[in-house]
Image (spheres, rainbow, N blue to C red):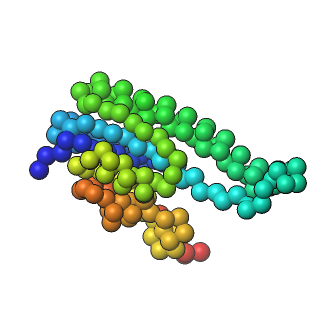
Amino acid sequence: MGYNRILAAVDASSLRSIVYEQALETAQLHQAELLLLHAIEADISPSSGNPLDTGYLSPSVVDLQMAQQAWEVQLSEAKQWLQDFCQAAKQQGVEATFEAELGNPGYQVCDLARDWQADLIVVGRHGRTGITELILGSVSNHVVHHAPCSVLVIQGEEKVMDVSG
């Protein structure tokens, strides 16, 4: 089985380089295109009130503005390291592009894989289990169950709680 289009879902964690390296190696092996995606969860719900009614900004509107500024900074930083990854891939003979977006990472990965017609998705797994996975969610779990193509999951270090004392 050969791959022509490989989508690598990279986040800002320590797994970023490992996922990238595995995707790059696979792209080289199959002479495939590589698309790097970094999606930033942008989940904040402003209050239903209209701040213009009172003439003052409600706390939720201020929170939303602060969140939007933080997202812009994160996107800018991500675009820099994504660009660096793409340049390194091109130096190794792999055609590489990137996208950095706001939105639910699991959905973004699957939607982009479908739209771009990816043959393979490479995604990292942080090793969350139980209640931590339930609360924080699992991008890799969502991708494995909803992807339109094959998925390669790169295992990160498992988070083990010390309950001995």
Eyeballing the image, is 15 above or below 90?
below
Q: Is residue 146 visible?
A: yes
Residue visible at 66% across and 59% down in the picture:
45
Residue drawn at x 55%, y 75% as measured from the top left:
163
Q: Please state the horizontal and vertical placement of residue 121, each as a whole percent of the image.
A: 30, 51
Return the x and y of residue 37 as percentages of the image width and height. Answer: 40, 43
Q: Camera-side residue: 120 or 60?
A: 60
Q: Is residue 61 left or right of residue 79?
A: right
Identify the residue shown where x is 52% and y is 47%. Answer: 102
Compared to 86, does 55 lie above or below? Answer: below
Q: Nearer the viewer, residue 114 or 21?
A: 114
Q: Quadrant of the C terminus?
A: bottom right
Q: Residue at x 38, y 64 (%)?
A: 141
| Closer-to-camera residue (164/149) | 149
- Residue 84, percent from left and from top: 42, 29
Q: Tell me if I can see residue 21 in this picture.
A: no
Relative to 112, is 29 on the left or the right? left
User: Residue lying farthest front?
Assistant: 53
Horizontal side of 1 relative to 126 (left or right) equals left
Examine the image and state in which quarter residue 25 appears.
top left
Left of 148 or right of it: where is 55? right
